[in-house]
Image (cartoon, helix red, strand yellow):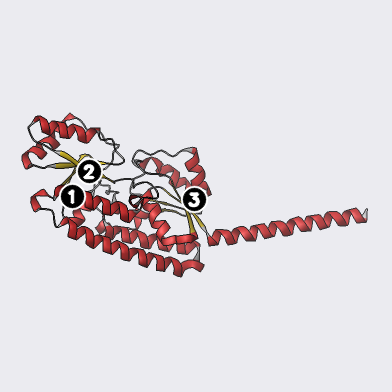
Amino acid sequence: MKKWLTSVVVAIVAIGLLAGCNSEDTTTEDLDEINVTATTGQVADVVKNVGGDKVKVESLMGPGVDPHLYQASQGDIKKLDEADIIFYNGLHLEGKMDTIFQKMSKDKPTVAVGDSVPEEMLLGADDSDAHDPHIWFDIQAWIVVVDAVEQELSKLSPDHKELFKENATNYKKELEELDEYAKKQIQTIPDESRVLVTAHDAFKYFGHAYGLEVMGLQGLSTDSDYGLRDVQVLVDTLVDRKIKAVFVESSISENSISAVVEGAQKQNHDVVIGGELFSDAMGKDGTEEGTYLGMFKHNVDTIVGSLK
């Protein structure tokens, strides 16, 4: 009997030691690699650049996905639940997911990067007290977001604080260079042609930063409706001001802008589609446009190429 009891005690101790080892390994693994779930490609790209090989990033919204209308799937909930930290844009960009973020914030860091941008850098929404959520189109505002991501990752993994700081510093240098590139390129467009017409009003920050007048058929959110009157108002503007090009967006159907082009043609004014811009979503993974830097440069080059 004593021999049997001894064997049981040894087995229990062994299981306890094994469990202790597994627990310690998990803690080390979590510290060495932070599991991140981000909503948009833009936010995910910042985390990848700052976190480097110390983060594993899942992005919920891929190429061509409209965050204004996005609804989380069961698979998304699982990714959010398994993450060590959640980053999202905020400012009601992912409006249909606000309740989910509130619930998740009780269990883990759930960070709206838009909240880090100072009030004076935010642009208002027309006829509303809300702010325009498309902050990534102002590089200076996006640099503030980089700093916020660095701080949050450093809280979770203090041992890699210096690495995150170095990565953030290097990335911000690239952003500053891109900002200067955009300013110089936009200046080559004649003053009277610096009018950017798109499907929805996603480029207000871009226009504000680089001196472009921006017009969108829909409002800040694609969840807003537009009608024949909205189309006609935009058509009349194109005709009256002799605007030659409009742009489609990768995350929105071309139908709305096509209606504007056809309306202008009926008034004997030729308008071309100047190209496809990335607004609420970036390009495919593995392409230049699948990164924030590449997406932004593509937009600048496409706009300048058509309006210049």
Asked whether the beta carbons under mark 1 and mark 2 sit within 8 Å of each other, the answer is yes
Q: What residue type is labelled 3?
A: Lys
How many neighbours does mark 2 have within 10 angstroms: few (below 14), some (14-19), or many (20 or more)? some
Lower sequence index among marks 2 and 3: 3
Provide residue 136's location: percent of width, then percent of height: 30, 53
Q: Is residue 112 visible?
A: no
Q: In this view, does 200 lie to the left or right of 58?
A: left
Lower sequence index among marks 1 and 3: 3
Q: Is mark 2 on a helix, strand or loop?
A: strand
Label 2, label 3: how many angstroms apart (C-alpha)? 44 Å
Q: Which amino acid does label 1 sit on?
A: Gly
Q: What residue type is labelled 2?
A: Gly
Name above or below for residue 225 compared with residue 34.
above
Q: Is residue 80 left or right of residue 281?
A: right
Label 1, label 3: how many angstroms apart (C-alpha)? 48 Å
Can you identify the residue that label 3 sits on? 106
Can you identify the residue that label 2 sits on? 275
- Residue 92: give its label: none
